[in-house]
Amino acid sequence: MKYILLPTDFSKNAWNAIEYALNLFKEETCTFYILNVYNQPASGPYTGITSAKAREAIYHAQVENSNAGLKDVLNKLNESYHNPNHTYQCVSKYEMFTTAVLNVEKELNIDCIVMGTKGASMFKEMTLGSNTASLIGIVKCPIIAVPKNKTFKKIKEIGLSTDYDINFTEEGLKPLLRLVNYNNSTLSVLHIMDRNYKLTPEQNEVLDGLKKVLQDIKSNFYTLTDIGVSSGVHAFVESRKLDMLCIIAKEQDFLKRILNKSYSKSISNHSNVPLLILSIKNF
């Protein structure tokens, strides 16, 4: 049994991510938790002397909107995606987004979070550097970030971008390995470095360890030189026509380095490739 968390703001892009998740885990026994998070803004016309009553009224309206929206999503799922392998449950939280996701992950033993990279309302300003990045270093489970308008197709090749700076373990790579084995995919490992540099003894040791972990799956190793990280990853995604890209995110700064604002827009609007984000905490 897998427990999958699907955050939604009831936008088209959030629904698109839900559909991607349902197809991705089509053959697996799963419980999907559809999560809606809402919270009053820090300031607004209701603040001041009469703020208590205004806040209460807004809170009750938000509760009703959240419950109604979740009910609509649930009805849509039951009508359009009846699958004996899948069950659905709704969760409504009055908290900040990151706090809500962290609490739900712990309470429900979530195995994976699938979310859209761009949406409306609370996701309005979201790129891969905002709400998704806010979870990096906080949640331990993998995150699959689905680009706008991305429809599911068979995952033939997955990329793994690495600096060979962490000790790869089978346990840490388990979410990636499950996807590779489940889809009979090829895993293409990418390392970007300067032309005049060579791998250090420590990096070679990591590389050997990774090859050992990957010895039973189809895998290829590539090196790009004299190109920036974000540009190199982008070029690799495009040239290989990857169906998914995996990164092991150590912290938010790492995500910002590999996926700067312009690149996150590009990967959402042009590369159209989902991201599998693994946490360093699991290695």
Image (cartoon, rainbow, N blue to C red):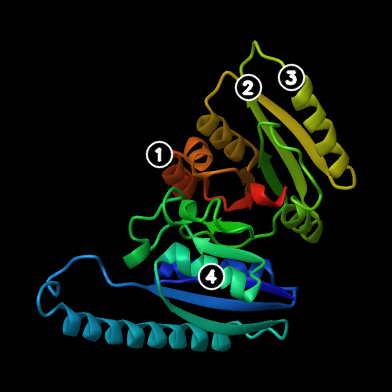
Q: Which residue is mark 1?
A: 262
Res 149 seen here: yes
Q: Which residue is located at x 60 percent, y 83 percent?
A: 88
Query: What mark, if any, has residue 103 been given in the picture?
Result: 4
Residue type highlighted by circle 1: Ser
Instruction: Between label 2 and label 4, give the one nearer the viewer.
Output: 4
Q: Residues within 10 Å of mark 4 (few under 14, many from 20)?
A: some
| Depicted 222 relative to depicted 182: above or below | above
Where residue 70 sits in the image (x, y, percent)? Answer: 45, 83
Residue type highlighted by circle 2: Met
Q: Which residue is located at x 64 percent, y 44 percent?
A: 248
| Depicted 134 relative to depicted 32: above or below | above
Q: Specify whether 53 is left or right of 280.
A: left
The CA distance from mark 3 to mark 1 is 31 Å
Instruction: Between label 4 and label 1, give the one nearer the viewer.
Output: 4
Residue type highlighted by circle 3: Thr
Query: What mark, if any, has residue 200 been given in the picture?
Result: 3
